Image (cartoon, rainbow, N blue to C red):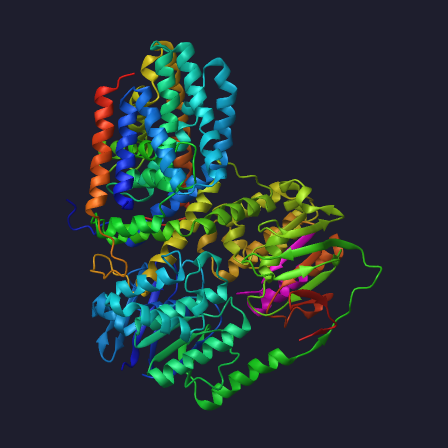
Amino acid sequence: MNPGLKLFLVVILALEVSFTQSLIVNLVLIGVSLLYLLLHRMSPKQFLGLIFWPLFPALGLFVSQWLYGDAGIHFAFVLFTRIYAYVFLGATFTITTNITDLSLTLEQDFKLPSKFAYGVLAAFNLMPKIISEVKTIKTAALMRGEVLHFWTPTLYFKAILASIQWSQNLAEAMTSHGFVENQERTHYQVIRITAMDWLLFGGGLIIVNLMFVFIHY
Amino acid sequence: MENKKQSQWTLRNIILIALIAIFTGIIFWGAGFLYTALTVALTPMGMAPFANDILMGLWTMAGPLSGFLIRTYGSAFIGEFLGSAVEVFMGGQWGAGAFISGLVQGVASELGFALTGYKKYNWVGLNASIFTTVVVTFAWDMIKNGYMHYSIIMLLGLFITRYISTFIFGGLLTKAIVNMLDRSHLSVSTN
Amino acid sequence: MADVSVTNFSFKYNQANTNTLEDENLTFQTNHFSLLSGPSGSGKTTLLKFIAGLYPKFVEGNATGSIQFDGKDITSIPASDRNQLVAMMFQNPDQQFAMNTVKAEMTFVLENIQTDPAKMDDIIDNALKFVGISDLKNREINTLSGGQKQRLALASIIAMDSEVIVLDEPFASIDYDTRVDLIARLKQLQTEHGKTIILSDHDLSNYKEVIDDFFYLDPATRHIAKLNNTQKNAFFQRFEQTKIKETVVAEPSASDPKIINFADFNLKPHGDSLLQLNGFNFYRGKTTLVTGENGIGKSTLFDAMTRLTKYQGTISYAKKNIAKIKPLKYAQNVSLLFQDAESQFLNITVKEELDLSLKNRFTTNYSEDNINQMLGELHLDNRMDQVVYSLSEGQKKKLQILEMLIMNPPVLLLDEPLKGLDYDSLRTIVGYLKDAKIRFNQTQIIISHQFSGIIDLIDYHVDFAAHNLTYQEVLK
């Protein structure tokens, strides 16, 4: 499915899940997402991660709603499954889509200005360098006898200094590689939204909404 | 629409906001264990939502920070939203929920700068952004995390906790960072 | 075809007191290979970015005069046409690419200049083949070495087919073989494809036979002059002489106390092994110089020793596995003087920086008088309230070294500590380092390309070659 449409579908469904209180629909969404993920060969490690980490917030919300909420145990279960619905819906997107394809379709099909599509993409592609830069900043500070925590302004100050420098370098390099803001570009890989994409998108939306209308437990 | 003034949304500034969002996302990532630990500690007492509210300021910090650095329409929103997108792609424990939260928090933070007409880049503007962030995200959690079913006392406790957290991270910490940048005469917002 | 003529061109950065470029008048001739040399930080980058049309868009400052391509002012040429005329390659191999893979970056470039998609595959294959990285077509850029990234950067420019190719210190961090190969490719672009090459480098190796014109930016006058043949030859000769000098240093003796040990050590950051060591030692209270070709992995070795990068096997400090020492404690024992001085700074002004070192230093060996004297000798004493980021590169380096000396760690790793220092400052600094070694028994491990002026500091010499470190008596 087209990555852009898939993203919108996931976000819309997640939004609807937030406003509704149907345990069954939540479970159906989790189940269908899980099936989709299995078809796309999610690794066992990824699967365990999806189950394990959300357990903390899900259980936390469940217990407090159960103890202090005035809406009964059913609502507590709704909240519990809501967290998992977010996570599994999100995973159908993140595990099967890469950010490059997303940028390409947002640029070509959703008319996102190319400077946003490629500017953000270029920044994301620096992710490994950013992780090691954070490590370097912290280590350099240790050598000056300072421990930088996530509440220390200096950590962010140094990170922003690096961001300023790198954004300058990248913007210059992209410009030198022919990128001109607001100028037409050709496309090597043309991404179109097919009728099938629209069918999946519309079908998914309609089915889930019908479920919300008819299933209230 | 803007006139005369050249748009601040240059390629360089877009990359800059995205980089800052990723940097902050990665720094918070290191604090993720804190959230889990707090949740584990608070769950038996049924007070787990407090973990969310204690750390709310951290999760909404990219907004005021970007809004303050790139002084134009939409920068707080984009900074905050991209920050949450980083979390989604790094495989955060909220999944698509982080996208939604990012949207809500982004709008919430942007609203404050909008209320002051994108003119008050001082404590007034920052406090406006903090205020809208707390109110909007809290309203959102009334629905999403079922806060509306708690007693008024618990709600008050959560609200105050969230306000303090957002004030500390979105206010004090952000201001301290911006002050360092100002003192070092490193301009961000010009091109 | 385009002559690039620079006329009455001056430039001052907004926060600088003096002009970086002062009334420059020169012409880079069409279809020539021009080399622009001069010390680092002297303004070469600034000029090249103006020629490439990146400045004034991406800089704050005041430029007067003109830069013209065959009579047309570069600033008056629309961005889309400029791409056909000139493209630039940068010094830093990182932060040059927007995309994640080699192929994606190449298509990105071609899409930008609105190439017909049907022609892209051929153009990409040819460009990658020309620079010798056809086999890397589908690789993630983040997994490439610095040299491979620079080859990709050149391939992008070849794909764009711009008439003038501007290169700013493109070989500063890449290996020798890549350097030799890429210089030959550039020559080929000039002779077989009619390109104009404008390249800056402070290292003159391998250029003598390939260049047509030699320009020199004199840091004293901030003036660029085209040298005649006699002057040109004199420059190359002087450069060769500084390289050939041989010096003999001692090899470690069995009685030397060991301080850092490598066991079953393997360093492979990009998948290929850079260095394998078993039973190698650095020695306490000695200054060891580590030499080796660019891009061979010297800085990466320091990254491993400071736990900034992963490695296999064990590094021990004073017989303890460094992976088991607490981060703060280890950092205070084995500190790194970063190649980029700004990496070391945490505060805003010179005074705040010094105060931080005084507050956190591990010993109080340096007295206040000591420090004030050093500040005076380094000419930093009248700059206490200046913002560190506005210091010149040389001043930043001096401040950085001073604050790390005050910290006084038992082991100090120094990555290119002499870069950007004038000779007098260099001798002063060498004096301080000797002093720290003699008075406090400090262990110093230095990576440096240049060693004229520091020979008297060096006790041992380690050569980094063929994935190995070996102590050598001859230093050349």
Q: Where is residue C67 in the image (x, y as percent from the top left)?
A: 28, 74
Magenta stretch contains residue C108 = no
Q: Which residue is nearer to you in this view: A154 or C90?
A: C90
Magenta stretch contains residue C430 = yes
User: On screen, B185 above or below B166?
Assistant: below
Q: Position of residue B155 (x, y in %)?
A: 36, 14
- Please tell me which residue is depicted at 35% across the width and 48% down the height of the picture: A99
Whether residue B167 sits left or right of residue B32 in the image: it is left
Where, by quadrant of the figure, is residue C265 drawn?
bottom right
Q: Position of residue C139 (x, y in %)?
A: 44, 60
> Split into 4 quadrants, where in the image is the N terminus of chain B?
top left
User: On screen, C289 above or below B94?
Assistant: below
User: On screen, A143 above or below A181?
Assistant: above
> Split into 4 quadrants, where in the image is the C terminus of chain B?
bottom left
- Please tell me which residue is depicted at 75% across the width and 48% down the height of the picture: C318
Where, by quadrant of the figure, is residue C52 drawn?
bottom left
Span colored in magenta: C411-432
Q: Position of residue C54 (x, y in %)?
A: 31, 64
Q: Which residue is nearer to you in this view: C15 or A5?
A: A5
- Please tell me which residue is depicted at 23% across the width and 49% down the height of the picture: A112
Whether residue B60 sits left or right of residue C461 in the image: it is left
Q: Mark yes or no: residue C405 visible.
A: no
Question: Which residue is most to the bottom?
Answer: C230
Q: Which residue is nearer to you in this view: A171 or C107?
A: C107
User: On screen, C398 above or below C424?
Assistant: above
